[in-house]
Image (cartoon, rainbow, N blue to C red):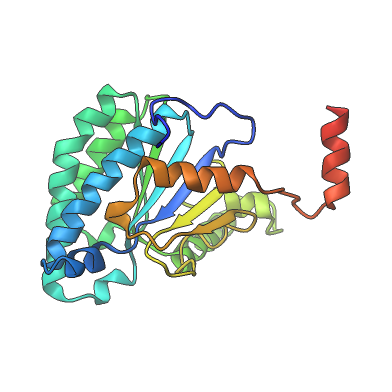
Amino acid sequence: MSKDDSTPLSDESMPRHIAIIMDGNGRWAEKRLMPRAFGHQAGVKAVRKIVESCAAKKIEVLTLFAFSSENWRRPKEEVSLLMALFMTTLQREIDKLDRNNIRLRFIGDRSAFSEKLQQKMAQGEAQTQNNTALTLVIAANYGGHWDMCQAFQQVLDKMATGELKEQKITEQLINQHLSTAGLPEPDLFVRTGGEQRVSNFMLWQLAYTELYFTPLLWPDFDQQALDSAIDSFKGRQRRFGHTGEQILNKLVTL
């Protein structure tokens, strides 16, 4: 019997931030002898279910890898379809996110997108900026290498103009200039589709993240599958460089 996704899994070990690579839309469609576009449309429905489930479970941040900087290498027809689907999804979902007190945020290099799409992204962020439930982060034209490079460049530029007086690069300084500044680092990383790699996604931020891989194709990833990923996370001991004994002793003294 599946768990009731409307009931929060109230536990101190729940992840604050879940990051997901949504892989397998095309293969899902091909298995059904349908065009890849059919799979991407089914993937949008899966996004809606997972966003609703994370909000119900009181997850603070959900980051979804929607379009990587490497995805431009796909066939032109598929890229065009993805851009059109991105626009129509935003037009349809922004008001719904706002009504449900969900904040929308985008990370990635927006300059490659059409002006109309960039405006719609900015509109969605502005409309939902004061919402306080789930923060939904969409990584679009995003890459971990890009994120670190742009952070380093910002720091160097500020040092050159005198805006930054310190001359030492620190982790805190870099964190403040990453596209995810102000957000907690991911606790749980999920990749659907059977591949077991992070594919240039949030490379800096995933340093101590628990990794979870599933063979499920993204359109098949539902609330029950999300619960399985969270249960796996809750069963792990996160040591952050300490020994298991140190962690247990700390729990005993709490």
* Observer-nearest of 10 and 209: 10
Question: From the image, which quarter does the C terminus lie in?
Answer: top right
Q: In this view, does 193 lie above or below 120?
A: below
Name the quadrant containing residue 23. Answer: bottom left
Q: Residue drawn 15% across and 69% down?
A: 78
* Observer-nearest of 151 and 214: 214
Q: In this view, does 173 lie to the left or right of 45?
A: right
x, y percent for residue 121: 25, 44
x, y percent for residue 33: 12, 69
Q: Residue drawn 40% across and 29% down?
A: 4
x, y percent for residue 107: 38, 51
Q: Residue drawn 51% across and 42% down?
A: 17
Number of labels in the image equals 0
Name the quadrant containing residue 125. Answer: top left
Q: In this view, does 160 lie above or below 121?
A: below
Name the quadrant containing residue 37. Answer: bottom left
Question: From the image, which quarter does the N terminus lie in?
Answer: top left
Does residue 180 appear in the picture of this structure?
no
